Amino acid sequence: MLKAGVLGAGHLGKIHLRLLQQSEKYELVGFFDPFTENATKVAEEFGYKLFDSIDELMAACEVIDIVTPTLSHFDCAKKAIENGCHVFIEKPITKTVSEAEAICALADKHQVKGQVGHVERFNPAFTAVREKINHPMFIETHRLAEFNPRGTDVPVVLDLMIHDIDIILSVVQSNVKNVHGSGISVISETPDIANARIEFENGCVANLTASRISMKNMRKSRFFQKDAYISVDFLEKVAEVVRMKEVPENPDDFAMILQNAEGIKKQIYFDNPAVQGNNAILDELETFADAIQQDTTPIVSLRQGTEALRVAQQIIDCF
């Protein structure tokens, strides 16, 4: 078991503490949070060991789980890496691309591993169809949320849209060619609604919309590729694959058949893959433990987290 400590005991930090304590791959050593009143309350309520300083926590750990505000990610990760600890960093990896690149370089120098908490990679609806997404040429995503003051210290692109940016970069095997974006502030000091268009060198185009002031919650993505359409509902954890294949010689009476202007016929097949329930946060933490123990590349590496941030920043720069 890997000795793990958590930095940050806010809403998400408490979830990470609970899951690390439950995991059979980690030994939860304790946590540190500079907000003494909240930290003491969490320690007393749940029995986790509260350390007096970051240095003391890091000295007792092999893995540091950083669940602090984005502005502090760089300083926390830098200190942890320099202390020889592997780091799990909640998304986005850091506030700026230059900070992210520095973290990647430090991890290489000190030969430690790092993973970024892009939890949607572990969403069961996405993992159920991940292998079926091959060379998508058009992608459309909608990530809408009801207003919540938590997270409004950063633009909605870094708060919500970055989830979809990471998913898209993971399935499109091509470099980004152009990025366009627009965003407006409604309630917050930073943009609350944003739309972006990402064009890739292979011709794929992705259209992303994110809002944190919607009347309802929605997290849907659609992937269009040759002879197939794949839909993923990250919120409801449902996936659908619609394929078009050559029409058999003797089609079923109820078969759905389309014919184009050239007379070519295609039959439509519907597939609703089985989605296995899971705890995505626990999965991402435990696969990170596997990567450390087996000396493999984490599923969401520091460099992948950096690339997602790079594209997010390009979108923000368009505002």
Image (cartoon, rainbow, N blue to C red):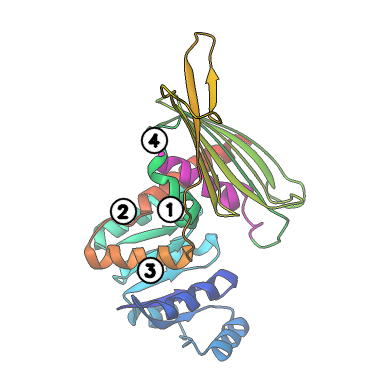
Q: Residue at x 22, y 62 (%)?
A: 295
For mark 1, give the secondary structure.
Answer: helix
> Where is residue 299, by image quadrant?
bottom left
- Given this view, does label 1 or label 4 mark the residue nearer the observer? 4
Q: Is residue 28 visible?
A: yes
Q: Is residue 94 visible?
A: no
Q: Residue at x 47, y 64 (%)?
A: 278
Mark 3 residue type: Lys
- If you read the primary sequence from the N terminus, does the residue marked by circle 4 or circle 3 appear first? 3
* CA separation in Å, label 1 and label 2: 10 Å
The verdict on residue 157 being magenta is: yes
Q: Of the numbered discs in the image, which one, if any, rests on residue 105?
A: 2
Q: Is residue 296 above or below residue 250?
A: below
Residue beneath disc 3 = 79
Q: Of the numbered discs in the image, which one, if any, rests on residue 99?
A: 1
x and y percent of residue 2 in the render?
Answer: 31, 76
Mark 1 residue type: Glu
Q: Residue at x 43, y 53 (%)?
A: 99
Q: Which residues are magenta?
A: 151-171
* CA separation in Å, label 3 and label 1: 13 Å
